[in-house]
Image (cartoon, rainbow, N blue to C red):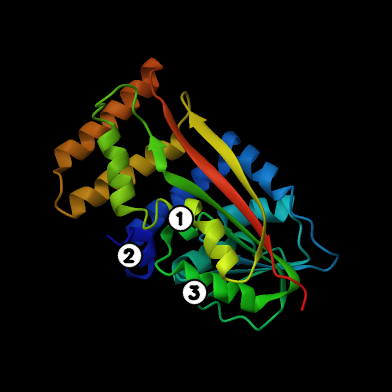
């Protein structure tokens, strides 16, 4: 099944607004901010560097890139015109950042003009990661870096015991919101085959118990998509939401997932 975000251009405004809210919540969580600070701090760029952010969305992750990587210029691309307008509004006062419609496999950018291509939670939604990697290599300068950060979504869990019914909501997330839940396990081989030299693959544990705002939005969107697909009824969607909130309220909620960051380079020619 193709994930909802892989079909982002087809989505109505209310779905895009829900995704944008989830992006903002995730980017504002201290746990995710700490992870982003850790992996982005490892990126060293030359003076006057140019960065291409693939799948910039509404600009929520762009703020973290600007803060921790500090490029001279950043171009963010996304297939959604709505998200591009949101990102442009967010950075209206920052001349370093600009945004344009484009896709990972067809960025619309010139050859060999970027020092870094970064994709933050993008590759799990791509239908053709091989073409996206070829495109990243095309737009990178010799010696340029590729950094990909994403969830190992196959590890997503909210279960507290064997057979926990709430885990079915996580299953709905995988079926409807994520196209490639195992992509980060496959990525090192794909990146090497695309002509890059893999430099590192680092794990980043993510766990929430007391303030799982992002995970709650993820579960809500996944179960809503399952209802839209006719898999479950609205009453079950609401019961999943109530149960997740009940666990947060009584201190029994648990949610976790592994994230990974991959860094690779395009050899000098």
Q: In the image, residue 100 lies at what x, y percent?
A: 56, 75
Which residue is denoted by mark 3 in the rendering? 131
**Picture quarter with the C terminus:** bottom right
Classify residue 178 as left or right of residue 49: left
Q: Gap between marks 1 and 3, in whole Å?
A: 14 Å
Dot 1: element: helix
Q: Nearer the viewer, mark 2 or mark 1?
A: 1
Dot 3: element: helix
Which residue is denoted by mark 2 in the rendering? 11
Q: Earlier in the sequence, mark 2 or mark 1?
A: 2
Using the rendered view, name the quadrant where residue 54 is placed. bottom right
Classify residue 113 as left or right of residue 90: right
Which residue is denoted by mark 1 in the rendering? 183
* 10 Å crowding of disc 2: few (<14), some (14-19), many (20+): few
Classify residue 50 as left or right of residue 219: right
Between 170 and 268, the one lying in front of the other is: 268
Where residue 164 is drawn, which disc sits there?
A: none
Q: How many labels, in total?
A: 3
Using the rendered view, name the quadrant where residue 128 is placed. bottom left
Q: Gap between marks 3 and 2, in whole Å?
A: 23 Å
Residue at (29% x, 42% y) in the render: 171
Q: Gap between marks 2 and 1, in whole Å?
A: 23 Å
Dot 2: element: loop
> Can see residue 103?
no
| Depicted 127 relative to depicted 110: above or below | above
| Depicted 26 relative to depicted 51: above or below | above
Classify residue 179 as left or right of residue 152: left
């Amino acid at each position: 099944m193709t994930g909802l975000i892989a079909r982002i251009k087809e989505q109505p405004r209310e779905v895009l607004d829900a995704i944008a809210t989830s992006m903002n919540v995730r980017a504002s969580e201290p746990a995710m901010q700490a992870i982003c600070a850790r992996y982005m701090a490892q990126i060293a760029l030359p003076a006057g560097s140019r960065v291409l952010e693939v799948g910039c969305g509404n600009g929520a992750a762009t703020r973290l890139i600007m803060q921790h990587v500090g490029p001279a210029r950043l171009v963010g691309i996304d297939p959604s015109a709505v998200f591009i307008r949101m990102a442009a509004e967010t950075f209206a006062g920052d001349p370093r950042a600009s945004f344009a419609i484009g896709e990972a496999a067809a960025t619309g950018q010139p050859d060999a003009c970027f020092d870094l291509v970064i994709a933050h939670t993008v590759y799990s939604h791509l239908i053709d990661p091989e073409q996206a990697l070829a495109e990243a290599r095309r737009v990178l300068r010799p010696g340029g870096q590729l950094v990909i950060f994403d969830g190992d979504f196959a590890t997503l869990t909210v279960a507290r015991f064997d057979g926990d019914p709430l885990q079915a909501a996580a299953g709905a997330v995988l079926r409807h919101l994520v196209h490639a839940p195992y992509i980060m396990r496959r990525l090192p081989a794909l990146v090497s085959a695309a002509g890059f030299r893999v430099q590192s693959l680092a794990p980043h544990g993510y766990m929430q118990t007391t303030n799982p705002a992002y995970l709650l939005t993820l579960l809500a969107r996944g179960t809503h998509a399952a209802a839209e697909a006719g898999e479950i009824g609205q009453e079950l969607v609401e019961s999943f939401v109530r149960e997740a909130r009940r666990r947060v309220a009584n201190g029994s909620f648990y949610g976790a997932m592994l994230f990974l960051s991959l860094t690779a380079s395009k050899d000098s020619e």
